[in-house]
Structures are given as structure tokens and as C-alpha cells.
């Protein structure tokens, strides 16, 4: 795979991570573009992997999506991503936290059983 193909593949992977998070947050491209102060056309190209982003745009997008720049670029979570999850848990009461704990344990069991 040459340098151009690697760049294209990376751009498509970044675009997919952005699409997935945008959809998870139930945002349209237009809404995300407005929040990030970027154009809708820009997001269309980025999500399709047709456009590379400058560092300042990656930072804007990561803030709006509540993701680390590491995750956007590499797909690997870091402390910022974990802190975002913890912040979602803070307002929950004890009963809700126990429910979430059970869901996580069941999820881990399911994922581990799929490895076999």
C-alpha cells in the first residue's frame, strides 16, 4: 500500500469515527457544522474520507463531539474519553449505578464469549 492509499484509508477511518459519534449524539451534519463553526460541505467531505483536516479543525470537532483528538485520529481512547464516560455516571443515583454496572458486566461477558 503506497502513501496515498494509506492516507485515504486513514481519512475514511476518521470519517467513520466522526459519523458514528455524530449519530450517537443525534446530530445532523448541519448541526455539527454549526456547533464546530465549520461548513456543512467540510463535514460531508470529511465523513466520506475525501478531505484531510487541519489540527485546529480536529480540535474543534473533538470538543463538540466530546471525544479526544487521539480517538478521532487513531480510534484509541485515552483518559479524556474515560473521563467523559465517568461524567455521564456522576448524576446517577445508587440504583441506576448498579444497573449500569450490571450492563457493563454483561457486555464484557458477551464480548469475551465472542472471542472464542
Image (cartoon, grey):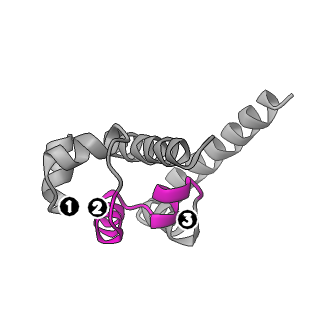
Spatial CA distance of label 2 from label 1 is 6 Å
Front residue of 32 and 11: 11
Q: Is residue 16 above or below residue 52?
A: above
Which callout, 3 or 2, points at the residue further toward the start of the chain? Answer: 2
Q: Quadrant of the N terminus?
A: top right
Image quadrant in which you'd find residue 49: top left
Q: Secondary structure at mark 2?
A: helix
Front residue of 10 and 20: 10
Left/right of residue 30 with respect to residue 72 in the rendered view = left
Q: Which residue is mark 2?
A: 64
Depth check, mark 2 against mark 1: the one in front is 1
Packing grade of label 2 (10 A; few <14, some 14-19, many >=20) is: some
Magenta-drawn stretch contains 78:
no
Q: Secondary structure at mark 1?
A: helix
Q: Quadrant of the C terminus?
A: top right
Depth check, mark 3 against mark 2: the one in front is 2
Picture residue at 55% right of the left edge, 56% below the top: 74
Q: What segment is highlighted magenta in the picture? A: 53-76
Q: How many marks?
A: 3
Q: Is residue 96 above or below residue 111?
A: below
Tags 2 and 1 in contact by the CB under 8 Å rule? yes
Left/right of residue 101 with respect to residue 31 in the rendered view = right
Which callout, 2 or 1, points at the residue further toward the start of the chain? Answer: 1
Q: Which residue is mark 3?
A: 82
Spatial CA distance of label 1 from label 3 is 22 Å
Picture residue at 57% right of the left edge, 71% below the top: 79
Q: Which residue is mark 1?
A: 36
Amino acid at each position: 500500500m503506497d502513501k496515498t492509499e494509506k492516507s485515504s484509508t486513514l481519512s475514511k477511518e476518521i470519517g467513520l469515527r466522526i459519523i458514528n459519534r455524530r449519530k450517537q449524539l443525534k446530530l445532523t451534519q448541519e448541526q455539527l457544522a454549526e456547533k464546530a463553526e465549520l461548513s456543512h460541505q467540510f463535514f460531508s467531505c470529511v465523513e466520506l474520507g475525501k478531505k484531510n483536516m487541519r489540527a485546529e479543525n480536529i480540535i474543534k470537532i473533538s470538543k463538540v463531539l466530546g471525544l479526544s483528538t487521539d480517538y478521532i485520529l487513531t480510534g484509541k481512547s485515552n483518559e479524556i474519553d474515560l473521563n467523559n464516560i465517568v461524567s455521564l455516571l456522576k448524576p446517577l443515583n445508587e440504583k441506576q449505578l448498579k444497573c449500569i454496572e450490571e450492563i457493563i458486566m454483561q457486555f464484557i461477558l458477551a464480548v469475551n464469549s465472542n472471542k472464542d
